[in-house]
Amino acid sequence: MHKAIEYIHEHQQVLRDEHAPSDEAGALTDPARDVLHDSRGMRLLQAASHGGFEASPADFCEWVRAVGRYNPSAGWIAGVVGVHPWEIALVDPKLQDEIYGSDPDTWVASPYAPQGRAIRDGDGFRFSGAWQYSTGTDHCDWIVLGGMVVDENGNPGEIPDVRHFFLPRGDYEIVDDSWKVMGLSGTGSKDIRIEDAHVPEYRTLFHGALAEGHYGERRKGVPLYQLPWGCIFSAAIASGTFGIAEGAIEKYREYLRTRVSALGVVGKTDPFQQEALAEVEADLAAGITHVDVMLAQWMDQLEQGDPISEGQRLEFRRNQVRAVQRVLYGVDKLFARAGSAAIWTTRPLERYWRDLRTGGTHICDTSEVVYGAWANHEFETGIKSILLY
């Protein structure tokens, strides 16, 4: 077990204690943030050249799950913010130095939705826009944002030039009081605004080139950085979701040990509740194994110099999404079988359920586009689906 994961388990009580306070604050509390920072888990996918561990994807996913089990919002931040160092390992070395040069523990926020508009200006761009869902942003000193290059009239080219734009904290505004949600409140996933910030060319990446793996040449010979970006990002989101589900199941188990219904049915001997628990635990174990094994097989494949095909990428996304969906349905069934006791805010089960269902709305956890993209590729229909991740 990686030392970053061990640290999380050793400090689980701090994370548990800060679950509700983080939700109330609308951002991760300092004690919870400190556990993530001090575990050094954010460095797991970070390049060794800039203080990172260059660890296996399995170690990273396990770390994210461990955090999410004890504190869902912290786990979501671990997945989203923790995967950004993987991309940063592929940016211009000058930008890597700017981000990590003085502090290898620097955190970088997002989101990637291409809602910004960039107009060419000297050695770079004038960049403006507004974004939602900047997870963990209060604790981050840089941000990476999706945007499109346009002309002075706001028109994109015939082939849209979609990029990721990296900016330091002073170049963008975090919109306070902009995160009002039913779950994962502690992620503080606030809105971001930018008006005519200057972004040099070297602080950008082409989205398509990243998605197709072209930037892997910058870390040639390191299999970790030859993985498909969309799949490693989706694995991070799935791991955050799985971690929350682990916590929800744990709370259900605790509840079941003492539950006696109004009709005198003992919860732990109730076959309906036993069934629901058995199913979701099996589905969760299968989902975790499925994602971990696929990534491990890819690492072996890349070690042999064999690139990952489009069909493999789509199969991964199909399997990853299905694994998540089974777990979501399973926890829903647990919640229903728990009876009216589950709705009380004085019990942790409902909080975990709200956090899990909120996480399940992320595009990486939803099925419709992914299944269609996989099927169209499988049957060579000629229909191309645009996958953001």
Image (cartoon, helix red, strand yellow):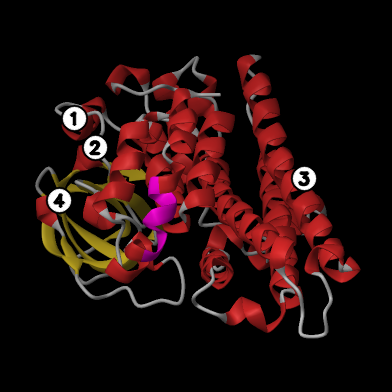
Q: Which residue is labeled 4 in the image?
A: 169
Q: Report helix, strand or loop for mark 1.
A: loop
Q: Residue at point 62% right, 52% down? A: 246
Give the number of the mark in front: 3 or 4.
3
- Residue annotated with mark 3: 286
The span picked out in magenta is: 14-20
Indicate the position of residue 101 as horizontal and vertical percent values: 17, 26
Q: CA distance from mark 3 to mark 4?
A: 40 Å
Residue positioned 36% across, 67% down in the render: 23
Which residue, given by chain and number where applicable, does mark 2 sit on?
106
Circle 4 packing at 10 Å, graded few (<14), some (14-19), many (20+), is some
Residue 316's spot in the image, x, y percent?
69, 44
Task: Report x, y in % for residue 366.
Answer: 62, 64
In this rendering, is residue 175 above or below 172?
A: below
Q: Measure the alpha-carbon separation of dots 3 and 1.
A: 38 Å
Using the image as rendered, state which of residue 112 and residue 357 is in the foreground: 357
Q: Amino acid at mark 1?
A: Asp
Mark 2 touches mark 1? (CB < 8 Å): yes
Return the disc, 4 or 1, that comes first in the chain's sequence. Answer: 1
Left or right, 8 with reference to 137: right
Mark 1 neighbour density, 10 Å: few (under 14) some (14–19) many (20 or more) = few
Residue 115 in view, yes or no? no
Q: Earlier in the sequence, mark 3 or mark 4?
A: 4
Q: Is residue 332 above or below residue 312?
A: below
User: What residue appears at the point 67 percent right and 20 percent down from the top-left corner?
Assistant: 300
Q: Is residue 49 left or right of residue 64?
A: left
18 in the magenta segment: yes
Under mark 2, the amino acid is Thr
Compare residues 247 and 88 and report the one nearer the observer.
247
Residue at the spot 34% in from the left edge and 40% down from the top edge: 35
- Can residue 44 be seen in this snapshot? yes
Quarter the N terminus occupies: top right
